[in-house]
């Protein structure tokens, strides 16, 4: 073999092929997430779900595919005889909303502060970096306990906790990416041409950070869901008025010996949803990376 030839095993994958693979991955990972969204948000509108009422004659009934179960309750019932599938779908709506809103409230201020620190440097960078280090030094559970014990359990309080505990990681990653972008030739050329700093940041720097921001946002969705589940396990979640998959998992832990399905299905749903979202984030990062984008 000539020295100029590359071993096919170790040869680098062409950027165009990498971009195509990323688009394919995004498509196939989006399908199950779309199915979950349809089941959670559309299925209740069809009237096909069992009633939510209590039935003390059918308490702790196993799922329909197990011995002793009934397909009238496909996922079984709880200790009050309430259908688990109906609760599961309703709780899924709240869980997905918590993940999306929790990601937005963290990625918004985190991206803004990270871009300001990375682009302007100097005292702006020093102040924001000190705030980031201070936030990362605080365990999120202590921040959550301090806020929830003072304000009580509710959705707005939960989103406040997610914002305060999630912005620092987003800011640190965005700052590092901005430091690399601001040294590129096109940014230096724009500054030399007299373009305003605001125009450079919003018209040129931020679009080049799209892949990083998208990946951070998708990862933050999974993080928000996991944080809510952890808080619900400690009794600090969204409160008893509304159920999420995290609160269902927490309430089902005491029933594992008698009705394992009460905790199994919410736990499985959380695991799969977070896994799919994280994989989608990796695929989107590759797809939106300008260095890998197909020309």
Image (cartoon, rainbow, N blue to C red):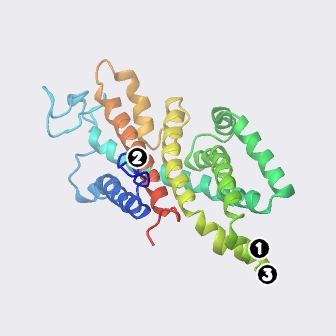
User: For mark 2, does the 10 Å Cα neighbourhood hold few (<14), some (14 to 19), or many (20 or more) residues?
Assistant: few
Q: Note whether residue 239 is visible.
A: no
Q: Residue furthest front?
A: 2
The residue labelled by disc 2 is 10
Splitting the image into 4 quarters, where does residue 132 fall?
top right
> How many numbered badges does the structure rendering display?
3
Sequence-wise, the earlier of marks 1 and 2 is 2
Point out which mark residue 184 bears: none
Residue occupying image coordinates x 59% and y 69%: 207
Q: Nearer the viewer, mark 1 or mark 2?
A: 2
Image location of residue 204, percent across then percent down: 64, 72
Residue 96 lies, with reference to residue 266, above or below; the image says below
Please say if 78 is above or below 256: below
Q: Which residue appears at 27% of the width and 42% of the height?
A: 85
Q: What SS does tag 2 mark? A: loop
CA–CA distance in space, label 3 to label 1: 9 Å
| Distance from the alpha carbon under mark 2 to that under mark 3 | 45 Å
| Front of the two marks 3 and 1 | 3
| Residue at disc 1, secondary structure | helix
Rendered location of residue 26, percent (x, y): 37, 58
Q: Nearer the viewer, residue 150 or 274?
A: 274
Which residue is farthest top?
Answer: 257
172 or 272: nearer the viewer = 172
Residue 103 to residue 261: above or below: below
Crowding at dot 3, Cα within 10 Å, few <14 / some 14-19 / many 20+, comes out as few
Is 106 on the left or on the right of 199, as rendered?
left
Identify the residue shown where x is 40% and y is 46%: 10
Q: Which residue is mark 3?
A: 194
225 sits to left or right of 55: right
Q: Is residue 137 above or below residue 186?
A: above
Which sits in the foreground, 253 or 114?
114
205 sits to left or right of 1? right
């Amino acid at each position: 073999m000539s020295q100029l030839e590359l071993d096919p095993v170790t040869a680098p994958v062409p950027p165009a092929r990498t971009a195509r693979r990323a688009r394919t991955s995004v498509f196939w990972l989006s399908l199950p997430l779309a199915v979950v969204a349809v089941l959670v948000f559309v299925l209740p509108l069809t009237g096909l779900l069992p009633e939510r009422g209590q039935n003390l004659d059918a308490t702790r009934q196993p799922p329909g595919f197990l011995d002793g179960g009934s397909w009238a309750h496909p996922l079984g019932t709880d200790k009050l005889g309430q259908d688990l599938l109906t609760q599961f779908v309703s709780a899924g709506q709240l869980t997905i909303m918590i993940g999306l809103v929790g990601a937005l409230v963290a990625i918004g201020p985190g991206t803004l502060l990270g871009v300001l620190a990375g682009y302007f440097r100097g005292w702006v960078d020093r102040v924001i970096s000190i705030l980031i280090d201070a936030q990362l030094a605080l365990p999120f559970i202590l921040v959550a306990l301090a806020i929830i014990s003072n304000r009580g359990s509710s959705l707005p309080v939960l989103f406040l906790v997610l914002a305060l505990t999630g912005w620092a990681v987003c800011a640190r990653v965005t700052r590092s990416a901005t430091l690399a972008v601001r040294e590129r030739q096109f940014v230096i050329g724009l500054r030399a041409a007299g373009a305003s700093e605001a125009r450079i940041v919003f018209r040129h720097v931020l679009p080049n950070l799209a892949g990083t921001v998208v990946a951070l946002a998708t990862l933050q969705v999974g993080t928000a869901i996991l944080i809510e589940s952890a808080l619900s396990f400690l009794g600090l979640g969204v409160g008893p008025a509304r159920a999420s998959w995290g609160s269902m998992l927490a309430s089902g832990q005491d029933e594992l010996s008698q009705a394992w399905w009460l905790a199994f299905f919410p736990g499985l749903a959380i695991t799969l949803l977070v896994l799919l979202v994280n994989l989608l984030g990796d695929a989107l990062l590759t797809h939106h990376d300008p260095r890998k984008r197909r020309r």
